[in-house]
C-alpha cells in the first residue's frame, strides 16, 4: 500500500485539531503528543479501513487509519466517562501481527465497533493464496528430490498421494509453529497451528479417523482393555511392566512415580519438609514415560511401524527415586531423542493424545520409536497409565493422512512444508488460512469502560480476548472462533493445578460483561470469569449472559464454556452445546449458574458432570438454578460436587437425559431441592469419605480430603482462603448476617461457620497458629473430629434432596453407608439430615407431571400440582423459563 510522507509537527497539529472539531481524533504522536494535546468537547470518533486507510491519515471518515492500533493511539488520553471515544471499523479483514493492547486510563472509555454493521474480521491467520498451493502429483521428480520435500515418500501408495496438495511455508516466511506437550495439570503452552479452509478447522492427520463415537464405542480411538469405560477394548496398546515401572496400583497415589505424585498436596506425608515442594514442569517432563505392546488395529499390517522410526531408545536414569518403600524405584527414566532419522521413511513428530490414567482428563505423549512389538514414548502422562483407561488417538502422522480434511506440517530439519488433503480433491476456489498467531487479539490491562461490539475474531493459538484488572468492560455481540485456548479470559490463573492451595484467579477486575455473543470451535473454553476477593468475599460481579457457546474443549479437558473463579460472578441465559467435557466449573464463592441450557455435553469423558466443583471445603454460597440439562453423555452427572466440595444450592432445574442428577461426594451443606429428573437412573449419589481400614472413631476422612483440609485451612499468606483472624472474622460476618442472597432473595447463611473456620488445638482448645499446623492427627490442628458432631466440617451434614420430581422410573438419591467398629456405628446422610429423598413425586411420563419441556412450565393440573400445590407451581413458573436463553 502507498503511504503518504510523514507530516511535519505543524501540519500534524493542524490535522489533529481539525479532526477533533470534526468528530475524529488524529494520531497523538510526535510533536502533538509532546505538546500535550487534550480532547475537545464532545465524543471523539475515529475511523479505520483495511482497504483504503493509512496510519498517516487523520482518522476521519474520509481519511481513515489502516490499523486498529493507530486508532487506539489517536484516541489515547482524549476520552473519559463523559466523553466516550469510538473507533468505527470499516468492513474487511484485519490481520494482526501483534495484540491490540489497551492500557490504563489512556485507553479507557472507548467503543470498538463496525461501521454501520459492516462485517469486520480480526485475525492472526496467514492467508495461503491459491497460487502457493501445488498438487503433489504435479511436482517434478527434481522438485521432489529437494530435501524440504523429503517426507513426501511417506505417502507411499498412489491412493495416499492422489488428491494431496502441498504449500511451502518456509518459502513464504510463514512460521510453522510448534507441537508442545499439553494436557490436564500441565502448564499450558500454545497449541499446534491449525489449518482453516472455507471457515472450517481441518483435522491434524490422525488415526483412527472417526470422531463421532459415544463414550463406549471403540471406532474413534485406540484402546487398552476398555474395562473402566464399560467397553470391549481391542487391546491396541497395552502398557509394559506397569508394576515394575510405577509400583503397585494401590500405591500409585503415594509412590512418587508419576508427575501427579510430585505436587505439594501429594507430598505432605513425606518426613522431610524440604522434599514436599512441587516439582517444576521441566522435572516432571523427564519422568518415566510409557512403553506399549502393540496389538489389535495398531499391529494389523504393521501399522504402528509407520508412526515412528525403528530404534530402542537410550534411557538416562536421572537418579531420582520414589517415596517410602519405592525408594529404590527410579522415577526419572528419560529417553534420549532418536537422532539421524530418515525423514523419507519414518515419522518424526507423532503423538498419542487422549486418556491414559483416568476417564476425566486428557494428556499427550510423544511417539519416540518402535522396536519389535513395542512402541516407545517420550514424556510421562500426568497420572499413572492403566490399560483399563487407555483411549487415545495417533496425531500428526503423515502416513495416516488418508481422509479428506486432514493436514500435516513437516517441521523436520526446517523443511516447513504443509501437506493437505482437501474435500473434493482440490484446493482451488477455497479460502485457506494457517493459524500461527500466538497472541491475544485484544488485551485490556487496567482499563475502564471499554466496549468491544460486533467484531468477528478468528485464528489464535492462545485466547482471544484477555482482561486484566479491567472494570466495566462490555464484550457484546462478538463472534470468536478457532482459538486454541479460551475465547475470553477475565483475569488469569496461577500456573499450578486446581487441587493446589495456591491455585487462584488473579486480576479479574469487576463489572465486566460478555453477552449476546457466539463463541465456537474452541480448543479451550468459552469465558473465564475471574474476579472477587476470597479473603473479604467482595464480589467480582463479572457476567457471561445470553451467549451461544458451542464445540469447545476440542484440544483440552477442564476448559468449560464458563469458568467461575473467585467470588460473586455469574453465568446466565447461555446456550451451551456439543462438547466432550464439562460445561461449567465453579472454584469460588457466591457464584450463580442460572437459566442456562446445557445440551449434549460431557460426550467423551467419565467421572464428570455438566457442572463441576471440587476439592475445596471453602467454596460456599454457590447457586445452580433454573437450568435445563439435556443429553448429558456417558455415566456422568448434571452436577458433580467432587471430593468434599460444599455449600451448593441446586434448585428448580430440569435434568433431562443423564445417568444421574447430582453427585454429592462427601461435602457438607449441599442441597438439591425442587428439581425435575427425567430419564435418569437415579436422582443422585455420593460417598462418605473415610480412611481405608479405619475401624474406630474419632477418625480422619480419607487421606485426600484430610490433606486438602489441612492445606486449605492453613494460615498461608496470599493463597486462597487463609485462616487468619481477619479472614475468619470476615467470613463469619458474611455467612451469618443474611446480607448476601441467592437470586430468589433467600439469604446465604451457614450458622455453623463459626465452628468450621476457627481451627483449634484439640488437646488444649486454644486457637491454632501457623506453627501448630505442623502437628498431625487429632492432637493438632487437623480438625479430625467425631462424626457424631453434625456441625463438624468433616461431616457431610446439611445435605438435602427434597421435592424431587422423578420421571421414567429412576430411583431417588443413593445413600452410601460407612460401617465401623470400636465402637460399632453406621453412618449415612440420613443420620445428619431429615430431608433425604423426602416429598418426591414419581411419574411414568412427562405429560403426567404437567410439565411442558418446550417452555419448562408446569400446568395447574397434573401429578406435581396435585402433590405440591398451586403455590409451588406458581413459584416454579415465575422463575423457570426457556425464553431468553442463548443469543438474541
Image (spheres, rainbow, N blue to C red):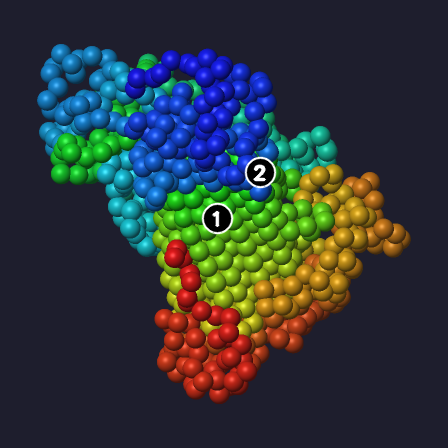
Disc 2 target residue: 80
- Horizontal and vertical percent position of residue 511: 58, 48
Q: CA distance from mark 2 to mark 1?
A: 22 Å
Q: Is residue 298 visible?
A: no
In the rendered view, would you say 809 is above or below 768?
below
The mark lying in front, picked from 2 and 1, is: 2
Sequence-first disc among 2 and 1: 2
Q: Quadrant of residue 269?
A: top right
Residue at (33% x, 49% y) in the render: 233
Question: In the shown orientation, is residue 360 left or right of residue 124?
Answer: right
Q: Position of residue 614 (x, y in %)?
A: 58, 52
Return the residue nearer the eye: 273 or 600. 600
Secondary element at tag 1: strand
- The answer to whether residue 19 shows anywhere in this view is yes
Using the image as rendered, state which of residue 15 and residue 86 is in the foreground.
15
Classify 10 Å Cα crowding around label 1: few (below 14), some (14-19), many (20 and above). Answer: many
Q: Residue at x 54, y 62 (%)?
A: 624
Residue 53 position within the rendered picture, expressed as x and y whole percent measured from the top left:
34, 26
Q: Is residue 479 left or right of residue 79?
A: left
Work out which quarter of the rendered image holds the N terminus and state it: top left
According to the picture, the residue beneath numbered tag 1 turns out to be 514
Secondary structure of the residue carrying tag 2 is: loop
Amino acid at each position: 500500500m502507498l503511504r503518504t510522507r510523514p507530516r511535519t509537527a505543524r501540519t500534524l497539529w493542524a490535522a489533529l485539531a481539525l479532526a477533533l472539531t470534526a468528530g475524529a481524533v488524529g494520531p497523538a504522536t510526535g510533536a502533538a503528543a509532546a505538546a500535550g494535546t487534550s480532547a475537545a468537547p464532545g465524543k471523539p470518533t475515529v475511523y479505520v479501513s483495511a482497504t483504503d486507510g493509512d496510519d498517516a491519515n487523520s482518522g476521519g471518515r474520509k481519511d481513515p487509519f489502516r490499523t486498529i492500533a493507530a486508532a487506539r493511539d489517536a484516541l489515547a488520553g482524549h476520552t473519559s466517562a463523559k466523553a466516550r471515544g469510538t473507533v468505527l471499523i470499516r468492513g474487511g479483514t484485519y490481520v494482526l501481527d501483534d495484540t491490540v493492547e489497551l492500557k490504563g486510563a489512556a485507553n479507557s472509555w472507548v467503543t470498538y465497533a463496525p461501521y454501520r454493521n459492516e462485517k469486520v474480521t480480526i485475525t492472526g491467520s496467514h492467508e495461503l493464496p491459491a497460487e502457493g498451493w501445488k498438487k503433489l502429483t504435479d511436482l517434478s521428480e527434481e522438485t521432489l528430490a529437494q530435501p524440504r520435500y523429503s517426507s513426501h515418500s511417506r505417502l507411499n501408495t498412489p491412493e495416499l498421494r492422489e488428491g494431496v496438495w502441498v504449500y511451502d511455508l518456509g518459502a513464504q516466511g510463514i512460521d510453522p509453529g510448534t507441537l508442545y506437550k499439553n494436557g490436564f495439570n500441565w502448564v499450558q503452552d500454545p497449541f499446534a497451528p491449525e489449518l482453516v479452509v472455507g471457515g472450517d478447522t481441518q483435522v491434524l492427520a490422525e488415526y483412527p479417523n472417526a470422531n463421532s463415537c459415544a463414550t463406549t464405542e471403540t471406532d474413534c480411538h485406540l484402546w487398552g482393555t476398555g474395562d473402566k469405560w464399560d467397553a470391549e477394548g481391542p487391546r491396541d496398546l497395552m502398557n509394559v511392566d506397569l508394576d515394575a515401572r510405577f509400583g503397585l496400583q494401590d500405591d500409585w497415589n503415594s509412590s512418587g512415580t508419576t508427575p501427579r505424585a510430585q505436587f505439594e498436596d501429594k507430598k505432605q506425608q513425606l518426613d522431610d519438609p524440604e522434599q514436599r515442594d512441587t516439582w517444576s514442569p521441566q522435572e516432571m517432563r523427564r519422568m518415566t514415560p510409557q512403553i506399549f505392546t502393540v496389538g489389535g488395529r495398531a499391529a494389523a499390517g504393521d501399522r504402528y511401524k509407520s508412526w515412528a522410526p525403528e530404534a530402542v531408545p537410550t534411557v538416562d536414569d536421572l537418579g531420582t527415586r520414589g517415596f517410602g518403600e519405592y525408594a529404590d524405584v527410579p522415577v526419572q527414566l528419560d529417553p534420549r531423542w532418536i537422532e539421524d532419522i530418515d525423514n523419507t521413511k519414518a515419522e518424526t513428530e507423532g503423538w498419542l493424545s487422549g486418556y491414559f490414567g483416568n476417564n476425566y482428563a486428557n494428556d499427550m505423549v510423544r511417539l519416540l520409536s518402535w522396536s519389535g512389538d513395542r512402541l516407545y514414548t517420550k514424556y510421562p502422562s500426568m497420572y499413572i497409565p492403566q490399560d483399563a483407561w487407555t483411549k487415545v488417538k495417533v496425531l500428526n502422522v503423515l502416513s495416516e493422512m488418508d481422509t479428506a480434511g486432514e493436514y500435516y506440517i513437516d517441521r523436520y530439519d526446517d523443511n516447513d512444508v504443509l501437506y493437505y488433503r482437501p474435500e473434493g480433491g482440490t484446493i482451488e476456489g477455497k479460502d485457506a488460512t494457517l493459524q500461527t498467531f500466538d497472541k491475544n487479539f485484544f488485551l485490556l490491562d487496567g482499563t475502564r469502560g471499554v466496549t468491544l461490539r460486533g467484531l468477528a475474531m478468528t485464528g489464535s493459538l492462545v485466547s482471544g480476548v484477555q482482561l486484566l484488572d479491567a472494570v466495566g468492560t462490555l464484550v457484546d455481540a462478538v463472534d470468536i472462533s478457532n482459538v486454541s485456548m479460551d475465547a475470553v479470559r477475565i483475569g488469569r490463573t496461577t500456573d499450578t493445578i486446581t487441587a493446589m492451595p495456591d491455585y487462584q484467579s488473579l486480576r479479574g477486575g469487576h463489572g465486566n460483561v460478555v453477552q449476546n455473543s457466539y463463541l465456537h470451535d474452541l480448543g479451550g473454553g468459552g469465558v473465564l470469569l475471574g474476579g472477587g476477593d476470597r479473603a473479604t468475599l467482595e464480589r467480582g460481579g463479572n457476567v457471561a449472559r445470553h451467549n451461544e457457546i458451542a464445540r469447545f474443549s476440542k484440544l483440552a479437558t477442564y476448559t468449560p464454556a464458563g469458568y467461575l473463579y473467585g467470588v460473586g460472578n455469574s453465568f446466565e441465559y447461555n446456550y451451551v452445546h456439543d462438547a466432550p467435557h464439562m460445561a461449567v466449573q465453579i472454584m469460588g464463592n457466591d457464584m450463580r449458574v442460572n437459566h442456562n441450557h446445557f445440551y449434549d455435553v460431557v460426550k467423551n469423558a467419565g467421572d464428570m458432570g455438566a457442572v463441576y466443583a471440587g476439592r475445596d471445603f471453602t467454596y460456599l454460597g454457590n447457586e445452580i438454578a433454573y437450568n435445563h440439562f439435556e443429553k448429558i453423555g456417558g455415566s456422568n452427572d448434571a452436577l458433580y460436587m467432587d471430593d468434599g466440595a460444599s455449600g451448593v444450592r441446586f434448585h428448580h432445574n430440569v435434568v433431562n437425559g443423564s445417568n444421574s442428577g447430582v453427585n454429592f461426594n462427601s461435602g457438607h451443606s449441599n442441597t438439591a431441592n425442587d428439581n425435575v429428573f427425567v430419564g435418569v437412573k437415579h436422582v443422585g449419589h455420593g460417598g462418605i469419605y473415610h480412611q481405608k481400614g479405619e475401624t474406630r472413631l474419632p477418625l480422619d476422612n480419607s487421606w485426600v480430603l484430610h490433606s486438602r483440609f489441612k492445606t486449605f485451612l492453613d494460615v498461608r499468606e496470599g493463597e486462597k482462603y487463609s485462616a487468619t483472624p481477619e479472614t475468619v472474622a470476615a467470613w463469619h460476618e458474611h455467612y451469618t448476617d443474611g446480607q448476601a442472597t441467592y437470586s430468589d432473595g433467600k439469604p446465604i447463611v451457614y450458622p455453623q461457620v463459626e465452628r468450621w473456620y476457627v481451627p483449634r488445638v484439640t488437646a488444649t482448645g486454644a486457637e491454632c497458629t501457623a506453627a501448630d499446623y505442623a502437628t498431625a492427627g487429632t492432637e493438632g490442628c487437623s480438625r479430625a473430629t467425631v462424626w457424631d458432631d453434625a456441625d463438624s466440617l468433616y461431616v457431610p451434614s446439611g445435605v438435602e434432596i427434597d421435592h424431587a420430581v422423578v420421571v421414567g422410573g429412576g430411583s431417588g438419591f443413593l445413600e452410601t453407608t460407612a460401617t465401623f467398629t470400636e465402637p460399632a456405628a453406621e453412618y449415612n446422610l440420613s443420620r445428619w439430615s431429615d430431608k433425604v429423598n423426602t416429598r418426591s413425586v414419581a411419574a411414568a411420563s412427562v405429560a403426567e407431571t404437567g410439565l411442558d419441556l418446550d417452555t419448562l412450565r408446569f400446568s395447574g393440573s397434573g401429578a406435581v400440582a396435585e402433590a405440591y400445590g398451586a403455590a409451588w407451581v406458581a413459584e416454579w413458573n415465575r422463575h423457570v423459563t426457556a425464553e431468553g436463553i442463548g443469543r438474541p
